[in-house]
Each structure stands twice: as C-alpha cells, then as structure tokens.
Image (spheres, grey):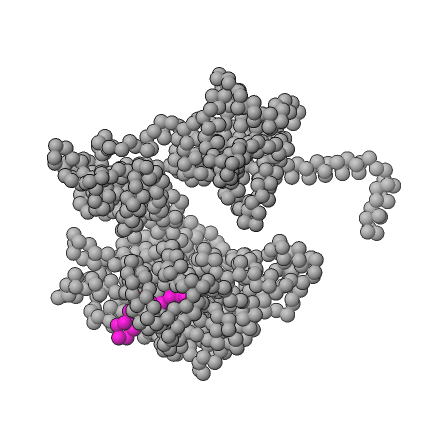
Amino acid sequence: MKRFVVGILAHVDAGKTTLSESMLYLSGKIRHMGRVDNKDAYLDTYELERSRGITIFSKQAVMNFDDTEVTLLDTPGHVDFSAEMERTLQVLDYAILVISGADGVQSHTRTVWELLKIYNIPTFIFVNKMDQKGTDRESVLASLQKELGDGCIAFDTDNTDERLEQLALCDEYVMESYIEHGDIDQSDILSMIENRKTFPVYFGSALRQIGKETFVKGFLNHTRPKAYPDGFGAKVFKITRDAQGNRLTHLKITGGVLKVKDIIKTHGAEEKINQIRIYSGEKYLTESVIEAGAICAVAGLTKTKPGDGIGIEEESNPPRLEPVLAYQVILPEGVDARQMLPRLREIEEEEPELRIIWNEVLQEINIQVMGTVQLEILESLIMDRFGVKVSFGHGEVVYKETIMNTCEGVGHFEPLRHYAEVHLLLEPGERGSGIRFESNCSEDILDRSWQRLVLTHLHEKPHKGVLTGSHITDIRVTLVTGRAHNKHTAGGDFREATFRALRQGLKEAESVLLEPHYQFRLVLPENMVGRAMTDIGNMEGNCAIESTDGELTVLTGDASVSAMRNYQQEVSAYTKGEGRLFVAIKGYDRCHNAEEVIQRIGYDSEQDVENPTGSVFCSKGSGFLVPWDEVKEHMHVESVLKPLKEAGAEMNERGHVAFEEEFISLEEIDEIISSTYFANQGKKNVWKKRGSAKESYYASLSYKGTSASNTTAEEYLLVDGYNIIHAWPELEGIAKESMEAARLKLMDRLSNYQPMLNCHIMVVFDAYRVKGRSESVEEHNNICVVFTGEAQTADQFIEKFAHTHKKDYRITVATSDGMEQIIIRGAGAHILSARDLLDAVYAEEEKLSIDHLETKKARLLKLEDMLSEEDKEKLKKGYAHQ
C-alpha cells in the first residue's frame, strides 16, 4: 500500500477546511460534510475553533483511496498561528496549497510558498471558490505563474498537448525527450513534481463539490511513496496533552519501525513508549507497531520537543517564523506568579511559538506572541485548562540586536583555584541567518572536550545584546582560541568565561537595533489610495500599486510592525469598512527609530549582573574584576584578530575577516581583471610573449627577483580547484556525477577566460591523499594545472607560492575558504571569492557572445551590400521556397 503524509495549507478564508471535508467525504471517512459556519467541521475539534471559525491547532485524519493511505494534516491559515503551520512542514511528503480564486495570491500565501520552497516540499495547488462571480480561470493561472513561478501548470484540462509543451519548458532533459519522442514519460513528470520544477494546478469549488474528484484523482496519479531506511528514525513535530492530562509526542516515523515498549533515547534520557495512537480528528486507534512513513502520537516520552530528531533522524533547524510582540501577563488578585509560571510552561511546551519569559527583577511573567488573535486564544485556553482569568498589558514590539563589524570577544574566569580563558570571533551574518556557533581552534591549543563544552554553553540560552537587552541574531560566533589549567579548571569555569567573552565582544562591536517588519497587501477603494500611500510613507515603509480595476486598488509593500500594529482599525475607519489589510511577517531589519527605542527601554549593560561584560583575574591569591574595556590588557592568550590585522587581513564592507564570500571590492576586481579581450584589441598580445603556461610555472619557481612592484610585476591568478568546484552550483552538480568532468569543465572555462586577462592562470588540485604521488604540472591549453603531492594540500601549495613570490609577482588567489583567505591576505596576496570569480567569468562570456553575434550580423550585412538587386531578389525567392 502506498502511504503519504500530506499537509493542506492556505491563507485564512481560502476554503482550506472545506476542501479537507470534501476529501474526507470522498474517501468515505465521513458520511456527512461538515461546514465551518455550521461549527461541525470534522477537523475543528476544539470549541475555540468552532466558535471563531478558524483553525488554530494542526490536526490529522487518515483516509484511504483504494491502495493508497493518506494522512492529512490540516494546518492553521491565520498569520498569528504561522509557527504552528511551519512545524508540520518538516514531516510532509507533499503539500496542497489552497488559493482563493476571488482573492488570488496574498501576503501570507507568499510566506507559505517561501516556506514550502525552504523545506523543499512538492506542492499541488487547488484554486478554490471558482464559483464566485468575477473569477476568471485564465487570469488566475496567469497570476499564479507571475507570482509563484512558470512551473504552475493546469493539470485538469483535456488539452494534453498544451500541458506537455509547458512541462517541457520546465526542464532541459524533459525538453530534449519531448522533442525527440513527442511525449513525456510519466516517471519524468513525477520527478519534476518531486523536485519542485512543476506544480500541478486544479480549479474548482470545495463548497459546491466542483472539481474535487478531478483533483483527488490527479493527486493520486501524480504522487509516489518515499523509500525509507531500515534503521529507526523519527521526527517530532508537536506536543499535546489529552483530556486526562497525558503528554503526547506527535512524530513521523522516518526509518524502521516503532513498537510499544521500545526504549527511546532523547536529550540524554532513555524512556519507554507506553502507547502508540493513530489520530483521526478527535478519535484515535491504538497500535502495537508502526512503520516508516506514518504519523502517530506516542505516550511515555517527557523530554521531547518539536523539531527533535530521534534515532538516525537529525534535529531540525529553528523555525523561521518567530513572535514579534511581547505582553505582560496580568494575573488576578491572589494568584502567585511563581505558581502560575510552570502551568504556562506546559502551554509553551505545546505551542513553542508562545515564548514565556520570567522577569526575576520585576517578579512578573511576559509572553511573546505573533499577534493579538493569538492573545485571545491564549486567554481562553488558560481559563479552560487552569480556571484562571488572565489579562495582558500594553504590548511591545520584540526587538533584536546584531553587529556590523568583526571583533574578538575575550573572557577570563580565574577566582582562586579556578581557571578558564575563551576567545570568540564575532562576525556579522546575513540578515535572517540567526546565530551560528562553531569552532576553529586547534586541539593542540585547547582540548576537544573543552571546545565542545564552550559550544554547549553558547547553545545553552538566548544571548542578550548590549543596547536594549534584546536577543542577538545574525551573528556568527567562532571559538578561535582559549586556555585551560590541568588542575584548576572545572566545567563551570568555561561557562563563565564563554558568556563573558561573548558580552565583551558585543560591547566592543558596533551594535545595531533591529525591528520586525510586515509584508502587507492593502485592498481599498481607488479614491483612498493617496491617503494610504501617505500613511505608509509616514511609517517609513515602502509600497507600490499592484493592480486596480477602477473601483478597488491593491497596494503591496512592507513597513515596521511597530508602525502598522493598529493600522487595520484606521483602514476600516477611513474606508468605512471597505478596506482590507493582510499582513505577514517579512523578517527583521534596522530599526527606524533606534535612538528613541534605546532611550525608552533604558537598558544598562553594565548593571546586568546576570550577564557580566568584565572578567575575573587572580593576583596574590585573590580574585579581582576587570571591566570589559581593560580585559584585553590582562589576557593570558594572545589575540587572534590583532596579528591578522597587522598582517594585512583587511575587513570587507560587512566587517568580515575573509570568512564569507564577499572579500574584495569592485575596484580590486578591476585591478585584477585589468582589461578585457575587447579593450585590448589593437594591442600586442602580452600572453604570447610569456611562453607556455607550463614554462611560466617553472620560471616562477626559479625566479629570484626582489624589486618588482605591484604595478609592473607579472600577475598570477591561483585557483583553488576543488574549492571553486564545490562553490559554483553548476560544477557542484556535475561533480556529483563525475569529479573528472567537473575538473575539465572548470579548466575549459578558465582557459576561455584567460585571454581576457593580462596574467597567468594556475589551477591547483589536491592529491595529498594519493599515496606515493609526487607533485605534477600539466598544461591545459593556455593555463597551468598543478596536482599536489602526497601529504600536501592545495592550501599549503598556494600559501607557499604566495609567501615565496609575494615580492616578485602580483598574486591573486581565488578561493572561498575563510581561513585560507586570512592566511593569503597575511602573505600579501589579493583575494577573489568563488562568487566574484564566477561573476567575472560570466560577464566576459556574455560580452564575447554579444560581440560574436554583432560581428556575424555585420558580416552578413556587408555581404548583402555586395550583391546585385537581381541576386538579392533570387535569394529572397529561394528562402520563400524553403
């Protein structure tokens, strides 16, 4: 039997629950179709959902269609419950995206689409409500292709030829097969769907039972089950409690089988599976064994949390959608906050997007949520479960902090009979990348066990910034060095030193405040557009007119959450109820009124005793505290960043020390690529004067000159071969099939690129693992190819060459290896990242292509001018007969 886990997703009010009911009815799972407005939908099992008419919690139902078992996961459509929806994505085999034909692609639809892309989930699209007046199939399909991509193809038409032509345009291999055979194999179509190259689109009305059978049949015909490994694995995506208070862990089996009484290890604890439940709506069946590919809920596990990987399964990355609003929880008279806190922690465990924060100083509970609707649901949930009537204070936006430059944070903890020192490199990351912790420290300097302990402590808690005490984000933190004492170091010492190092680095860095932004879609009468655009401008947001039909106009754009929080009420007021505002979380960006916010919050990083910025040293048998700005004068281990700066490891425009792709400015690229093939036309070919690539290489090894300047010396471009192959997407794809083919492709492209430059190109490949191999040099057309010898890496060869010849030649190294770039800069060579090299090669190839076409065109025009009028007429007649 085929088995699938399918998620159904949509913007609120698109008809997602109604489509779920239709599928359940068609499968025979239910005898009567429920409706949201009748409050009897099969999957709306909570009273809150029935009363409000929205899905709040994801639920499952198991359906059977002949030889296929489908586990349907119904997810919330409201933006406030986006995190609940995102958690289900990690266990889906396929997704069904429901779009209202009347409303089209909305802000939250785009958010869902991006998440489906990130989680790489094959997606079917059902355009609902096509029975409503004014909906047009062709215009909706065109809109989908414009908004979501050309891969959106109608699969419910009888015109198979047109569909095959559109499918062929989505894949180069399929195009060749279609041209050759005039048809596309079914397995190729399934592969295109699985690889998200095409997205089958179906039209209909779930409420009117239009198109549902065609859709279900099409879905079953264009899906195939996954293959799972034999070893046991499971992915946790949800925690709930049943009516009796039993804790349930919802998971998908991703390998092997799971049996009752099996012992499961999670977070260092071994626990027994007491019960396995298969839910459908409110009801469930118990099973003694469950196979891979199925969704179940198990009792007996107490340590699990959403995103956990069990067995061979890896832990998931943190959700991308996070709470953006914070409120104080106001408890009624006589209810102690400390007693209420563990109860709220239960709800947080089930709904991780609700962040419960205890303020020890004020002895109060704060909660972070996605929006005000979530607050109303939480209030009802607390009353139903605990009988406590809570309220909430005035909301505040959840700010974050990041840094704009690279710095080295140092922390030392040395009271009597304790010792630990930690050095952390802090670098700004891409916006939205979160925090990354890693180690780049030699085990000769700091034992591996201590390094693991430092990384464990870094992951231990969210870390505060120094501007407002908000959590930091978009930073890469690397352990670069440290020191322990054989006798006096204990685990807790490194905890203290690690936290102090991070805080000291934040104090030294250039910190900036970030605030959340909404991506919005505003529908309003045409005569109100001027007012709306003025409002958005006053919010320092961005907007543009997406469409207008003479009556209603659609504005799209983005603005800060703090500015747009209550704008829906304003829109309703000045449009007299005709305007509608749809928002979705876009992410974080620089705060538009940072100084005002920092002053209002009034955070003093020096007075935060739980997050100290200074370090503790020992002198004459007693410890003493050193403030953050004097710590580096007392450190026992030499700074890593300072020697790199002195050696020439310049910072790039984003503050990185050659750890990212962007290490060289456009001016430097212009110096390296001194002139193109076209710019040198009419000049003597300097390359021919220099002899062959192989001769140039051996000449470089024996060259002893010392006075060559950077402006007159010969130039060498050294390319770290395997690094570039794995950095260029095209070559990496080829390498998966054949590394030899990828090497040849790289050498050919560089060989074609070489005439554009006024320098030698040397490509270096690792061969250090080949026992007994000696260094070899080959010539490939006009470039030199070096294979290193045994026990010599390409990095070592390049470093040696750069160090030996830094005064003789102008040397540029193409690599995206962070540490390699630091060393190369220290040796006085220039750096060209893999991305910049690819851009330069592309640019020259494009110029060459354009010039070739123009030359060919000019030659044809010149030939035509040489013909007589009679010959021209004969030539035209000949073409006409053809």
Magenta part mainly helix, strand or loop? strand
Percent x, y of residue 178: 67, 59
Looking at the image, which residue is at 51% across and 36% down? 772
Q: Is residue 312 visible?
A: yes
Q: Is residue 413 left or right of residue 157?
A: left
Towards the viewer: 262 or 811: 262
The part of the image, by quadrant, that contains residue 168 is bottom right
Extent of the magenta region: 239-254
Q: Residue furthest bottom?
A: 31
Percent x, y of residue 442: 34, 38
Q: Is residue 329 magenta?
A: no
Q: Is residue 13 above or below residue 439?
A: below
Q: Is residue 730 visible?
A: no
Q: Is residue 249 magenta?
A: yes
Q: Is residue 562 above or below residue 244?
A: above
Q: Is residue 703 left or right of residue 867?
A: left
Percent x, y of residue 717: 53, 30
Looking at the image, which residue is at 20% across and 71% down? 387
Looking at the image, which residue is at 48% across and 17% down? 706
Looking at the image, which residue is at 26% across and 72% down? 245
